Image: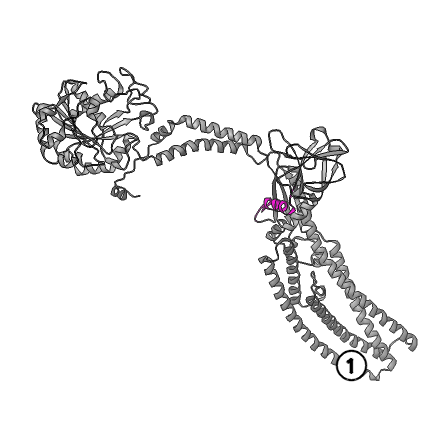
Amino acid sequence: MTDSSSELFGEKEAPFNLRTVFIKYLRYWYWFLLSIAICLSLAYIYLRYATPIYQVSATLLIKNQNSISNEILKELEPSSTDKVVENEIEVLKSRSLMLRVVDDLNLTVAYFQQSQGRSDKEIYNASPIRLQPVQLNTLANKGLFIKVLNHNQYELEDEEGGAKGKFNFGQMAKSDYGSFRVFLNDSLYRKDNALVKVLIYNRENIAEHYKSGLQIQLVNPKSTVLKLTLEDAVPKKGKAILNSLLVAYNYSTLTDKNREASNTIRFIDERLGLITNELGTVERDVEAYKTNQGISDLSQQATLYLGKVSENDAKLNDLDIQLKVLEGVENYLKSSQTGVAPATLMVNDPILINLLTKLNDLEAEQAKYERSTQPNSPFLQTINAQIASTKSSIKENITNQKNNLLVSRTSLRGQINSLESTVKTIPRKEREFINIKRQQGIKESLYLLLLQKKEETAISYASTVTDSRMVDAPYGESFPIKPNKTNIYLVALLAGLLIPIGIVALQGILNDTIQSRKEIEVETGLSIFGEIMKKPKEMKDNIIDSATNSVISEQFKILRANLQYTVGTPTPNAGKAILITSSISGEGKSFVSINLALSLAMLDKKVVVLELDLRKPKIATYLGVAKDKGITNYLIGQSSIDELVKVTAPNPNLFMISSGPIPPNPSELLSNGRLEILLIELRKQFDYIVLDTPPVGLVADATLLGPYVDAAFYLVRHEYTPKTYMRLLAELKDSKKFKSLNIIFNGVNYKNSNEYGYGYGYGYGYGYGYSKGKGYYV
């Protein structure tokens, strides 16, 4: 809030004082000690019984396909695309891999033994027994207790130690938990570990638990090295889980690559079988023809023709191969088979090669996502859409290529027919032999091509390696990362400090009463005229013995001494009138009025106290004065001044006029003009006139009397007066309804004051005489 808005609402912000704040909290030092002791004790108990958690880590290098230095292997690699590290992270964190780890390590069964001062301790790979579930209920919240009796028998117990039955090791056991078998590990059995607690976890839940606990991140943004971390109470178990996960990941990668290569080899083998049969038939035809016809050599013309025809036949053969390859690709697209497209190895068109390679990559990604994601995963749906689009492009490309190849084949057929028409002059035997020889060349070239591709694929299959390498095997820290003793104790210490601070601050926020004189001065702009300490508990009477040198007595003497600076010194026939009021009832107006008047009377001054709180008069009771007649009687004209003034017992110079009967209309009586006459007469007879008035915050009586007095003293009681009434006090100052408005800070509890330090008041000791040091404690 700005300064202007603060002034508008009558609120002013006090300047920050570090010393005041420090003293405010220092008063409650014992709270801080108790809170710190409790928090540190709770921290110790927590550390005493908490299960330590260790961190296990491993690093994995994801290889880039372009990093393979061997050019031959690069050419033979079925897939040439780079690995996407983010995809490999998702594969490593996949549910399918973690389920495989849970099955491989049998993580659904856990063995525990009681640990001194801590919760049950898991004994991974150190249990003297091994439980083989047959049909068990999940006991994650309820343990199965097995006590080894001897090398032949064991006993089931419940959580209270009650026996549930004896069984032989290896025997099928049936109980409330289901059916199972228990086997004994003699090498690990000792008498001190005879009782074992077994927990059976749900397979899906335990896999999800470790999956969510697995953290994978890049070691360096510019590298492809991944760091895998896992937290577990048993470091050996954490290492085993990470190691099994990496083994499962590598096995999955190798399986995918080997499946692709095996599909290609299988396709080539099928084609080789067909070509081998056809080639054998043609070769037998050549041999039979030569034998039957007796042909040993061809003429020069036949040789030249053979060369031309062979060249065209070779081109026609290539076209036929391309058409068969395209037919193979079409058949591959129509089938549900996945893996490398067989015809990729013999396709010459770079666009089709890229499309087939892309399809191969997408199908590999599809297989991975099907293992690691749900069927309705958006990633899987995106891959499926891309596969469909790629297949459509391949089909369109094949159609265009087939049309071009058919046109070329028709052209070659025409050329071949033209050449054959010229061969009519060649003898029939030569022509027939050339036809047979041409068929042999076609089959032989196709056979050699398929053999070459088969060898290349076999080499690629034999050299298949994983696309990752373990840089650092799983390793664990020697010290637990949780709980961190230093951090726990620091948090406990901080909590021990913050809890009392919060309580004290909350008290301050919820407390709407005046806590210090600085609050009064800041809110009202008035200085404190004087202070009166809180009345000691042993002081039962409201009248203070002014003859003593007690702290509270001295404070009233200071008020008395300061009066001359406010109202001046009384003269004959011109006494001084003092009005005492406050915000609300209970702030000590009557107490201050009596004791200030008594302190003045001890100076041999004639003082009269007017009980002008016509609604709740108290002074007459405190001074033991009769209430039969008083100010009410005078204001209605029933009594004279002499009849009202009565001497009091505490001091012969102290007089009083009681309120008299309680009227129904006090404000109207005070405004009828007779009170001014009363004060004029009393000024002639007394040196000081003390007016005890009702609270100005509740009724208007005090403000009606303002013009008739020399000074007004406004009481603010420590830890009692609401802060909201300081606005009213500021308005009284600004309106100048009183000639001199002064503030008396009453009931100050120096023990709870922020301004004087802990237990340090004005420097007076409680008792007799002046003794600088400890103040009065309530």
Q: How is the image coloured?
A: one colour
Report the quarter where the C terminus lies.
top left
Q: Is residue 215 magenta?
A: yes
Q: Quadrant of the N terminus?
A: top left
- What is the total number of numbered labels drawn onto the structure image? 1
Q: Residue at x 74, y 58 (%)?
A: 262
Q: Position of residue 249 (x, y in %)?
A: 67, 49
- Classify residue 361 as left or right of residue 445: left
Front position in the image: 438 or 588: 588
Residue 639 is covered by the magenta coloring: no
Figure check: 210 above or below 165: below
Question: Taking the image as drawn, is residue 289 in sight?
Answer: yes
Front one among 96 and 591: 591
Left or right: where 425 falls relative to 150: right
Q: Could you tell me residue 755's position as x and y percent?
A: 31, 28
Crowding around mark 1 (Cα neighbors within 10 Å: few <14, some 14 to 19, many 20+) is some
- Residue 300 lies, with reference to residue 735, above or below; the image says below
- In the picture, residue 173 is in which quadrant? top right
Magenta region: which residues? 200-221
At label 1, the amino acid type is Leu
* Coordinates of residue 674 in the picture (x, y in percent): 9, 32
Looking at this view, is 333 or 58 the one in front? Answer: 333
What residue do we see at 33% from left, 21% from top? 777
Name the residue tied to disc 1.
419
Residue 706, quarter of picture: top left
Residue 727 location (% of width, % of height): 24, 38
* One can see residue 448 in this view: no
Q: Which residue is more in the foreground, 708 or 179? A: 179
SS at circle 1: helix
